[in-house]
Image (cartoon, helix red, strand yellow):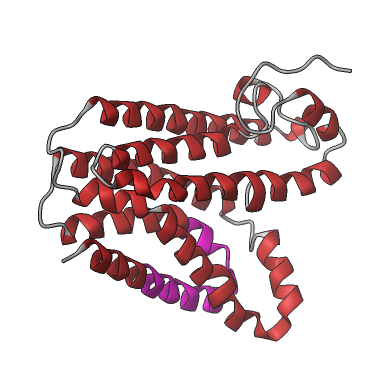
Amino acid sequence: MTGVTTAVVGLGTVLTVLALVWVLSVRLRDASIADVCWGLGFVLLVWLYCVLSPVLTPRSWLTAALVTLWGTRLALHILRRNHGKGEDPRYKAMRAAHGRSFWWHSLFIVFFLQGALLWLVALPLLFAVSAREPAALTIVDGVGVLLFAIGFGFEVVGDAQLARFRSEPTNGGKVLESGLWRYTRHPNYFGDAMLWWGLYVLAAATPAGWLTVLSPSLMTLLLMRVSGVTLLEDGLKASKPGYRDYIARTPAFVPWIPRAPR
């Protein structure tokens, strides 16, 4: 099976699975389950690419293991965070805007759109898993693992610090400004972008893997300008009185030393 055919099979598989999840979301009247499927979709794709690849190298197994670790952890984190809270406000707003036809529109504007983006971001995984050469791991692979480890650490620690902060009733309406959140307003988003650049480097260790550079670029763009920083901060400015001051002091994405208060 050629790489193009494998990629097409991957896209078809993701869209089929998300269509089934969409049916469940209609029954539950909760489109938020799409968020849980984001990380698991990458796990599905990487193992599908392993199954369809005629040859598996140490890089193949390494890539599959890293993606499984990240995707499973993210899905469990989102599931635990959303449990008992009902549908996410983003989807509630969409539901209100589309009225009775939201059940149908959600298939395309939520599930199929997510599937297409997921598939595009995951293209480096196809190269990292299916490439025959170099058969052994290289220094470039080591750089990729290092970037992944840094990103994964930022994401896990950032999420844990935020969850602990939110669990304290006295912190309602306050802004988290300690730990990693002192140096970046979104350590979890920065970590997510960083680890995907690490996975891209694993692909770039193969002869044609560098061609997938648009995939981590797309993920970074989504996190910074679309579904991540920009979307989240629009609400935080209105709900947290001290958030504008926090913006003035703290870098938005890449960690750095906080600026002195004006």
Give the mark count: 0
Tell me what residue is drawn at x 27 percent, y 65 percent: 4
In depth, the one of 170 and 10 nearer the eye is: 10
From what the image shows, is residue 152 above or below residue 258?
below
First to last magenta residue range: 14-37
Residue 50: x, y in percent?
19, 54
Q: Is residue 189 left or right of residue 173?
A: left
Q: Is residue 39 magenta?
A: no
For the N terminus, the image quarter is bottom left
Q: Is residue 31 magenta?
A: yes
Tell me what residue is drawn at x 65 percent, y 79 percent: 102
For the C terminus, the image quarter is top right
Q: Is residue 61 left or right of residue 16?
A: left
Residue 188: x, y in percent?
56, 36
From what the image shows, is residue 132 above or below residue 261?
below
Residue 204, quarter of picture: top left
Residue 182: x, y in percent?
67, 21
Tell me what residue is drawn at x 84 percent, y 28 percent: 245
Residue 25: x, y in percent?
53, 73
Tell me what residue is drawn at x 87 percent, y 36 percent: 241
Q: Is residue 27 left or right of residue 52?
A: right
In depth, the one of 20 and 195 nearer the eye is: 195
Residue 29, quarter of picture: bottom right
Judged by its main secondary structure, the magenta piece is helix
From what the image shows, is residue 116 above or below residue 142?
below
